[in-house]
Amino acid sequence: MKHVTKKVTKKASVKKIPKKITSKTVKKTVKKVAKVAKKIPTKKTTTKATSKKQVRALVCAPGKHCFWTKDGQVLEDLNQLQIAFGSMDDEVFLHHVTKGKNDFADWVEHVLLDSECALGLRKSRKASSSRTVVIKCLRGYAL
């Protein structure tokens, strides 16, 4: 006995397009689309709170509140402090910064009213790293 195999072909299902579009067909289509849309997962959009730091005005120390370094420089603001750190000798820096004190950080915190910058200066042990701290802090100021 011989085996006979038949090829089974599936006809592609073709949806009938109505000849005349009526409000009834539009309603059915809308319902179908709504069902499909419910099944599709959607991403929840969240709005990120943009945390822009406020640009502050650079505080300039008045007369007797200026900072006098050991080598005779007179500093009035953070910009002058970062320039001074760039050319300051280690001896001068170490005169103002020891384990027990940090004259620069105290001045920045109490006179220039920048506690964030003062905190960074307290962690610095070299003039170069102190200069980097001040440069980063200056980005928040309107110059």
Image: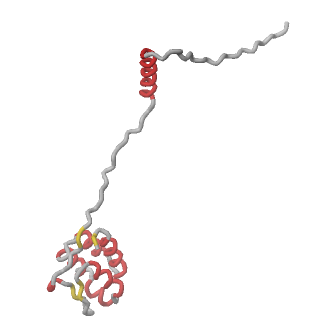
Say which residue appears at 22% left-offset and 76% top-offset. Answer: 108
Quadrant for residue 5, please give it: top right
What residue occupies the far front of the structure in this picture? 20
Give the answer, above or below, for where 29 lies relative to 117.
Answer: above
- The answer to whether one can see residue 102 in this image is no
Examine the rendering and report whether any part of residue 99 can be seen. yes
Q: Quadrant of the C terminus?
A: bottom left
Residue 6 in the image, given as x and y percentages of width and height = 76, 12
For the residue pair 124 and 18, the one nearer the viewer reads as: 18
Q: At 55% from the left edge and 17% from the top edge, which residue is drawn?
A: 17
Residue 105 image offset from top left, x and y in percent: 24, 77
Q: Quadrant of the N terminus?
A: top right
Q: Residue furthest top?
A: 1
Along the line of sight, the residue nearer the viewer: 1 or 5: 5
Q: Is residue 110 left or right of residue 50?
A: left
**Display coloring:** secondary structure
Q: Position of residue 137 (x, y in %)?
A: 30, 71
Q: Which picture quadrant has residue 74?
A: bottom left
85 left or right, relative to 39:
left
Q: Residue at x 57, y 17 (%)?
A: 15
Task: Examine the rendered structure and indicate whether residue 112 appears above or below residue 26.
Answer: below
Residue at x 70% of width, y 16% of height: 9
**In-image side of 75 versus 128 (left or right):** left
Q: How many marks?
A: 0
Estimate the x, y position of residue 58 in percent, counting from the top left: 24, 74
Query: Residue farthest to the right?
Result: 1
Query: In terms of depth relative to the viewer, which is nearer, 131 or 143?
Result: 143
Work out which residue is located at the far bottom of the displayed protein and give it: 71
**Considering only vertical position in the picture, is 16 above or below 43?**
above
